[in-house]
Image (tube, grey):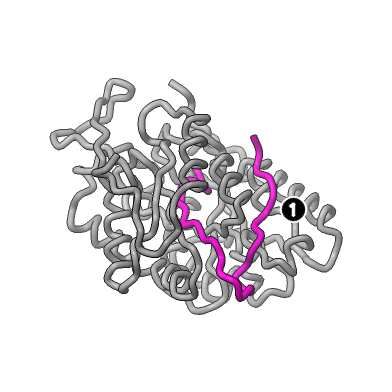
């Protein structure tokens, strides 16, 4: 299904907006690891679900692309969990946080749509295999999916907390959880969008609770 | 295994073209829809204001794509400051990272027929890519 419709709001309006912070690769699948892109450009079901509900889109930077390059292979959380990568993620967080702070402080309703299963952008789940390394070998490679944030999301949330901002309600599109079930992923996202409480500071998406 | 579906083409897009204010929404083409229809991913530029670090981060990403076989274009909005692209800041950042020539720019207008503008944008996007020999070199 293609992308339909546009946002009903803009920054120039005084009324609060609904703002969705969106993982970079959900708007640009070229950012994915080699062999990881499911769409040519944007992930249209995500865009359509957000726009049809009046969300402004705010794309986040891709942490892996600028660190390991566009020709990188896939990796798990533990491989990216290094001081250098975390410092890189903090720099990106410092780049985008002023915009997010602006949205939150003007009273916008802000949510975050990450990428479940991603070592970097996972929200409810990330990929894990503490002893994984060496030459990638798909599809034989095997890793665990564990209920935990990815490193980029951890660092972004830490930066927002440093600025005194409340936690942002968040969920993930299950693109990196193994086989993609687009219809189920869409239902899951729409359920989140339609049911989550936008009250400031509430968070019903604790990975430990899933 | 399902083949990789990436489109190898990316557009730099102003915030105002992705999230147009109500006064402009009907006057501008639906840029996201046109990008999707033509297989382009997007890199969103920030709204008006000072965003030095974010523009540097964006330039890093554009350089990575440009150096590895991706076609990158920029879509500006006519009569917006710096066309909504922060071009005065972004262009030197791109040159500094070896992105030469700079991505070709296409301007969309809010003061003409939006449907015609959408067609003009679609034609620009459909007609742009890297030379075939570069595509063959990188796109395996």
Whether residue A16 is in magenta: the answer is yes
Where, quadrant-wise, is the N terminus of chain A in this rendering? top right
Say which of B13 and A202 sits in front. A202
Q: Can you give x and y, in whole percent of width and height, for residue A69 in the image?
A: 37, 48
- Give the residue displayed 26% in from the left and 40% down from the top: A147
- Give the residue displayed 73% in from the left and 74% down from the top: B79
Q: Is residue B59 above or below residue B139?
A: below
Q: Is residue A122 above or below residue A135?
A: below
Residue A79 relative to residue A57: left or right: left
Where, quadrant-wise, is the C terminus of chain A in this rendering? top left
Quick check: can you spot residue A23? no
Give the main secondary structure of the magenta stretch.
loop
Residue A101 relative to residue A43: left or right: left
- Give the residue displayed 31% in from the left and 54% down from the top: A152
Whether residue B135 is in magenta: the answer is no
Q: Which residues are magenta?
A: A1-29
Judging by the rendered image, the residue that carries numbered circle 1 is B121
Q: Residues within 10 Å of mark 1 (few under 14, many from 20)?
A: many
Q: Is residue A112 above or below residue B6?
A: below
Chain bearing tag 1 is B
Q: Can you give x and y, in whole percent of width and height, for residue A157 in the image?
A: 31, 60
- Hey, which quadrant is residue B74 in on the image? bottom right
Say which of A35 and B15 sits in front. B15
């Amino acid at each position: 299904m293609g992308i339909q419709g546009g946002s009903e709001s803009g920054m120039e309006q005084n009324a609060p907006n609904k703002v969705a912070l969106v993982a970079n690769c959900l708007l640009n699948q070229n950012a994915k690891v080699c062999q990881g892109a499911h769409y040519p450009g944007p992930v249209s079901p995500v865009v359509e679900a957000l726009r049809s509900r009046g969300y402004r889109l705010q794309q986040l930077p891709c942490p892996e692309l600028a660190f390991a390059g566009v020709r990188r292979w896939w990796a798990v959380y533990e491989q990216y969990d290094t001081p250098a990568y975390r410092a890189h993620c903090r720099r990106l967080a410092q780049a985008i946080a002023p915009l997010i702070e602006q949205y939150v402080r003007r009273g916008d309703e802000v949510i975050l749509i990450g990428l479940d299963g991603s070592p970097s952008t996972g929200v409810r789940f990330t990929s894990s295999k503490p002893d994984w390394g060496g030459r990638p070998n798909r599809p034989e490679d095997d890793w665990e999916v564990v209920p935990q944030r990815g490193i980029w999301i951890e660092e972004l949330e830490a930066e927002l907390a440093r600025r005194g901002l409340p936690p942002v309600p968040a969920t993930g599109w299950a693109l990196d959880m193994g086989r993609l079930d687009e219809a189920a992923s869409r239902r899951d996202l729409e359920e989140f969008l339609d049911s989550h409480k936008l009250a400031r500071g509430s968070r019903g998406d604790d990975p430990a609770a899933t | 295994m399902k083949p990789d579906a990436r489109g190898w083409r990316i557009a730099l897009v102003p915030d105002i073209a992705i999230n147009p204010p109500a006064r402009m929404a009907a006057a501008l083409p639906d840029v996201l829809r046109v990008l999707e229809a033509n297989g382009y991913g997007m890199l969103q530029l920030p709204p008006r204001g000072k965003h030095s670090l974010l523009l540097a981060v964006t330039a890093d990403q554009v350089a990575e794509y440009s150096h590895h076989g991706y076609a990158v274009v920029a879509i500006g909005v006519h009569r917006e400051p710096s066309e909504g692209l922060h071009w005065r800041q972004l262009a030197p950042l791109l040159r500094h990272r070896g992105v030469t020539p700079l991505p070709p720019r296409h301007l969309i207008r809010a003061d003409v027929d939006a449907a015609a503008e959408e067609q003009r944008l679609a034609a620009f996007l459909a007609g742009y890519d890297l030379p075939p020999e570069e595509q063959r070199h990188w796109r395996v």
